[in-house]
Image (cartoon, rainbow, N blue to C red):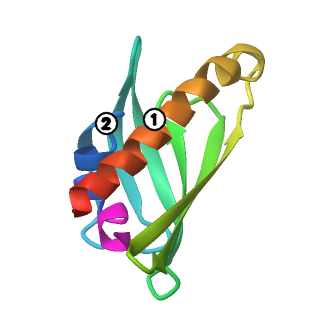
Amino acid sequence: MFRLITDAHQLPSWNRAITEVLHAPARLEPGSLWTVRMHVPGRSWVSRSQAVAVDRAGHRFAYRPRTDDGNPSWSDWEWRVSAIADGSAVTVTVDLNPVTFWRKRLLIHVRRPGLRRELRDSLRALAEHIV
């Protein structure tokens, strides 16, 4: 499970909001960069992410994506995979950091419910991908 989550080339196979990987590092390490095309109903954009932590022994992966349009807003993502009796448990945390007026006042409220849905869908797709 952890290998799948940290393989940037595989992102579109389980994250339906990612339609294309534009650039991916050969091996993901702290500081590695990758670029994807995102799509949610009504919007499409390029997102650039940088790995903050890649702890293969502890099964922890953290990164910071930003849009490719120069907006200073960002989010921090962390994925943790834990072994359980019948497989793996995946925990995801997201810290959204809107900076500009419109992202603080409007887009954050629009994006949050969709993001929850996308996370549920991605976790479901991950589980199906592994089975």
- Which secondary structure class fits the magenta region best? helix
Asked which quadrant contains residue 10, the reply is bottom left
Residue 101 in the image, given as x and y percentages of width and height: 77, 18
Q: At x 71% / y 32%, what residue is drawn?
A: 98
Most foreground residue, 7 or 26: 7
Q: At x 38% / y 71%, what residue is drawn?
A: 2
| Mark before the other along the chain sequence, 2 or 1 | 2
Q: At x 39% / y 45%, what residue is drawn?
A: 122
Residue highlighted by disc 2? 16
Tell me if residue 102 is in the magenta stretch.
no
As drawn, 18 above or below 77? above
Start and end of the magenta stretch? Answer: 1-6
Q: At x 34% / y 43%, what residue is drawn?
A: 15
**Residue 9 in sight:** no
Residue 96 in the image, given as x and y percentages of width and height: 68, 40
- Position of the N terminus, as image quadrant, is bottom left
**Residue 27 in sight:** yes
- Tell me the tag on residue 118: 1
Disc 1 residue type (three-letter): Glu
